[in-house]
Amino acid sequence: MPFGFNLTHAALLALTLFPALVLTVRHSSNACLFVLVLLAIARAVTRRQSRPLPAIDRRYRWFVLALAAYPVFTLARMLAASDHNGAALDTTLRYLLAAGVFGFIARIDSRRLQLPAWGFAAGAVGAAVAGWIGLHLLRLERGTLPFVNAIPFGNMALLLGYVALLSCFWGKPTHPLRRLAGSVGLACGLFASLLSESRGGWLTLPLFLLALLASLRLGRLARAGIVALALAAGAGAYLGNDIVRHRVEMAQSDLAELDKGNANTSTGIRLALWQAAWRMGTEHPLFGVGRGRFQPTLAEYAREGRLDPALTDKRHAHNDFLNHFAETGAVGLLVLLGIYLVPGALFLRAARRDDALLAGAGRAGLLVCASYLVFGLTESMLAVTMNAAFHALTLTWLMALVARREAELTAVAAPADAVARQRRQTWLKRRLLPLRIALARLLWWVPARPAGLGRPGGPMVFLRWDGKLGDFVVSGFLYGELKRRFGCEIAVVVAPGQEALYRELPGVDHVVDCRRRHPVDVLRAALALRRLGAQYCVELNDRARWSDLLFMRVLGARVNLKGAGPAFNQFQLLDLPDDGRVVDRYRAFLRHFGIEAADWRFDWPLTDDARAFARDAFTSRRARLVINPFGASPLRSLSAARVAEVANDLRADGEVVILVPPGNDGWRDAIRPLLRDGARLCATTDIRQSAAVIAAADLVISPDTSIAHIAALHSRPLVALYQPQPDNLARWTPDCPALELLVAAPAADGSGQMPVDSIAGAEIVAAARRLLAAVPPRARA
């Protein structure tokens, strides 16, 4: 990827700075969160889709809902009680903001999304320095800075050190500098915690030890040795460190004073506040006394003689759970538990996976959830915006890392898993098809209109928003032919991220992006083009989709054309052929307007940068052999082992280049050790670069995807790998003059759901050599 500072780089910088500065620069965690929100808004407004990435599993929506439910409930509770406590809402809104940026952060690939771990190590070091300055230079009572309470300071310093060390085990092998940074980060985090004298955070040390032992994957004897060493270190800290011994002895003294009836100690005050909070919750069990009403209620208790008046200046109960029970009741307590238990369940699931990064990030996230839960037993950690922002951002970053890594692994999953998953999806779609047709007829039926289409004298709008690049390549000639014959305005509605591609096509005047699954976006796109006064609205696919029908209704074109079979005849039906290549359907569409001869091999203009990239992709004058491993699904993709087998065998026939687009780090790591000299990877950043490499190739090997059609567009000899699906073969076989079509063996159940990876490597190599013999490579100077 060319160097440049873009939205992704800015997001990574903010994610790295928020742990690095949280305990040393005031308001830094809030500032980083607000910056991420602005970046997410910028991405949503521009809808810039820099690269295709595997889809995030829908179960992570529960994480977003859990975070968003906390501030939404707080706002609802305040509105219901006519209580306008802005401070309470301000704190909980951090979780809503974090939920809003989750999707934006999760678009970053897992390799780069690990970079913020360095910020945790830097933050732990900064905490140690800040604690020393606060204790020895500023002469504060405990090691902290004036803007941070000592208890959250020590707790967050520990958490910074924990994550810094655990991140060392996310990759294999771990770089020595990363191990050093993690070790230093843990030591500094422990040191800062000691300077702060925050005893509650020390209860999380056993949890960290468990996470560390799980990350090390050691035998029983080694684990027992580490536990013994930890116990010895704890005993040594107690005996040899005045701070630790003083704080432990102070706790014992507080309990002794409490037995004598003296509650005016640190422990005694906490117990009195806990009792008061419990009383508030039991007196108002469902919704509590109201957010921010803890201190006024303490004053009421003091006036009634039920509380020591000296405690009425306390703003919270020094316990997150009792504080929420008192202020928001049992319902609010359940909502609070959601931001611990829902992420914890997702992190626990990830921690059980075999992948080192996924399991490591899952363990780190689980430790963050458990640690904040423990911290909340002795301190109201979520009562301050800085603490809430740090917690919300840490959870969001780790969950985004888990979700992105899981999506990347799923994209290169074993063919057997992909087959089972796609069969389940196909079965469900077939069962729902009659219902979809019935609903479409009920809601959107329009009587058939006369077959005559007339001459296109006004604008034409094409719906091409299914996001398939192969269809973009095959159908691109439509617009140029219509423009040359009739000169009418042509608008195209496309999926986000494809606007630039369609603007480059000859004949296209207007391009509007639209997410067809979002009703508001469908309405926006239709209203944006309504001013054109379209004569025709054209949808040439075979599916009955509510988005097509809603768009056509709002657009209000004089004639709506649908290229589907009779079952979908909500609008005027075109008599397009169901058999033959899909390009023949598009030619038949043009014949309705009197255009008989159409050259579908339009010249897709490639930029100078793309052509320069293609020149650099090849390093010799030998035959240029290009392999594209990836299709639209795992069933249409080749495994790293299969590609390596083919590439290594073809090294004798020419220079082998393997196209690898972004978002395939797991696949890339798997194939690198398998490749020999003469076969190498070519990292592309967009489809233009891939198209330029294909145009310069002497032979292309590709599954059923847009790359195969680009090879046909440029008349490149092509070995095409397809699944045994007759309908798909009939429609989408590339119209290529030099073609070797290899089809996977049929599935036993006749479903056609067999992966192209089941085609033998020797068969692919033999087909490539037959093409090279029939079409010699181009001569080069």
Image (spheres, rainbow, N blue to C red):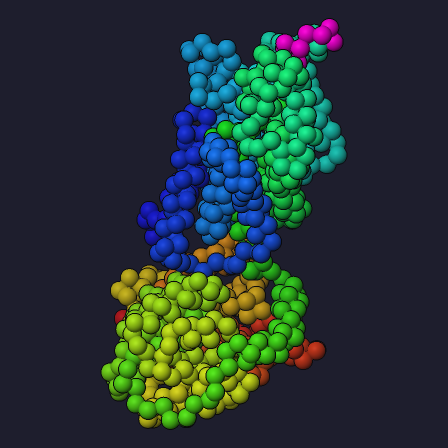
Residue nearer the viewer, 158 or 699: 158
- Residue beneath the point at 62% across and 79% down: 434
- Residue beneath the point at 36% across and 68% down: 527
- Residue beneath the point at 50% across and 85% down: 569
x and y percent of residue 508 in the render? 29, 74
Q: Quadrant of residue 9?
A: top left
With respect to residue 347, does 514 lie above or below?
Answer: below
With respect to residue 266, does 404 lie above or below?
Answer: below
With respect to residue 14, does 131 lie above or below?
Answer: above
> In which quadrant of the rendered image does the C terminus lie?
bottom left
x and y percent of residue 274 in the render? 66, 22
- For the magenta stretch, what is the residue range? 259-269
Residue nearer the viewer, 743 or 635: 635
The total of numbered circles placed on residues is: 0
Query: Does residue 301 appear in this view?
Result: yes
Residue nearer the viewer, 212 or 772: 212
Give yes or no for residue 268 being in the magenta stretch.
yes
With respect to residue 344, does 533 lie above or below?
Answer: below
